[in-house]
Amino acid sequence: MISYVTGDIFVSQPKKRTLKAWTPFGDCVIILFEFQNSDIDEEDSGWRLNWVAGIALLRTIGHVLAKCDAETSEEHAKVINAAWDRWKRDAPENSIFWNFIETERNSLLKTYTFGATLAPADAGFSVVYSNGEDAFQLYREAVYWWRHQLNSIENALP
């Protein structure tokens, strides 16, 4: 899998920012900041609310691209549809979308089943995803993946 985690997500700004999908992306960055800067304990369920909102927003970015940004012009539709085709064709390279964003969003919003759970850790508690990975790290990778995708789409637009 390609690593999209480059540059500080909190300070680097895209050169071009015309897509409406940047708005839910910005909210994902805020939630990522909360994940990275909060203490987790068994009494605090705040992470769960941020998790639901964050996962929903990660998927919202794709919906806004497909339903709003693609309607902007024929060129927008062409570039955005090509991106979706690429993500589908290269599913292993885009597994963060298919195996995390899409899967977790469906579990949460359709059955309110969490793939992330609170687990004891050396220094208190951590949030672990169903595959054993750090859930907040997966969220972080998804945010970086979307930044890369949005930048690529922006660069392909006239």
Image (cartoon, rainbow, N blue to C red):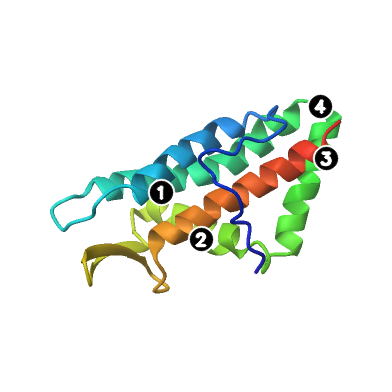
The CA span between labels 4 and 2 is 30 Å
Amino acid type shown at disc 3: Ala
Residue on which disc 3 sits: 156
Q: Residues at badges 4 and 2 in contact (C-beta under 8 Å)?
A: no
Q: Residue 19 location in percent, x, y?
A: 68, 30
Residue on which disc 2 sits: 100
Q: Is residue 145 above or below residue 13?
A: below
Amino acid type shown at disc 4: Ser
Which of the 4 image quarters holds residue 89? bottom right
1 or 4: tag closer to the N-terminus? 4
Query: Between tags 1 and 4, which lies in front?
Result: 4
Amino acid type shown at disc 2: Phe
Q: Residue 124 location in percent, x, y?
A: 19, 64
Question: Is 154 on the left or on the right of 140, as rendered?
Answer: right
The CA span between labels 4 and 3 is 13 Å
Dot 1: within a 10 Å radius of its alpha carbon, few (fewer than 14), some, or many (20 or more) residues?
Answer: few
Disc 3 is placed on an element classified as helix
Dot 4: within a 10 Å radius of its alpha carbon, few (fewer than 14), some, or many (20 or more) residues?
Answer: few
Q: Residue 26 location in percent, x, y?
A: 52, 34
Q: Is residue 22 above or below residue 81?
A: above
Q: Residue 52 location in percent, x, y?
A: 37, 47
Disc 2 is placed on an element classified as helix
Query: Between tags 4 and 3, which lies in front?
Result: 3
Residue on which disc 1 sits: 109
Amino acid type shown at disc 1: Leu
> Residue at position x 50%, y 40% from top?
10
Disc marking residue 73: 4
Query: Between tags 2 and 1, which lies in front?
Result: 2
